[in-house]
Amino acid sequence: MRHRVRVICGFVFLAGLWFSASVFTALAGETDTPKPAVVVYFSNPKSETMWPALAEAFPQEAAQAAVAMPAGLQLMDASLLGPHAEFGRLVQVHLLGRCDVAEQAFRPLARGLFGGPLGWVLRVDGEIQPYVYVDCERLSQYLDAKVLGMSAEQRQQAMVTAIARIMVHEWLHITLQTADHTEHGIRQAELTVDELVLPRAASGD
């Protein structure tokens, strides 16, 4: 079974899209160029327990997929940001719903839950915006059959790995500024459960 990741087109108002280092430097009155960053927002505070594992998994998954990251890239939990945090180019990642799959694994599958993508970005006036969205509830149900026999720790690690891989997939849409996909690898339009959670050699990636 495969599930789709998607670029969604639309006309929406987005504040603070892709900030340039020069703007931040001018505001701060400093000469040092702020570093680029990925800032992660958890819509449900209970999901923040997975932050340390996710912060470790994202760069690891990017490296394993041979995806180059900008020098000095910072990965930040939005809840820990100070009022004067400064960044160069900024990508926001919004994790929607409960991301701790352990408590969702035994829920019955909601009607029409697979009617949408696991992750997506927005394209406005032809430009893919630096906002990533991951539907954790849909993802947890998608992984359901795979994780039912796992321990709570293993289930959380499976969820973390899947989120990190979706983040890398959407990162590529943003940095490459294309909605195109490939036939194989992390840029596939549809990823199986195994491709989301298994070690890359085992998943065939």
Image (cartoon, grey):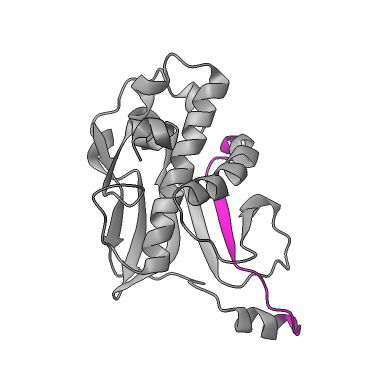
Q: Is residue 127 left or right of residue 100?
A: left
Residue 42 seen anywhere in this rendered image of the structure: no
The image position of residue 105, as x and y in percent, is: 42, 21
Q: Which residues are magenta?
A: 28-48
Residue drawn 59% across the image and 35% down it: 46
The image position of residue 154, as x and y in percent, is: 53, 23
Q: Quadrant of residue 42?
A: top right
Residue 56 colored in magenta in the image: no
Q: Is residue 145 left or right of residue 25?
A: left
Residue 75 to residue 95: above or below: below
Residue drawn 46% across the image and 42% down it: 163
The image position of residue 3, as x and y in percent, is: 27, 39
Instruction: Say which of 43 and 155 sits in front.
Output: 155
Residue 179 to residue 2: above or below: below
Residue drawn 24% across the image and 29% down it: 111
Instruction: Say which of 109 and 121 sits in front.
Output: 121
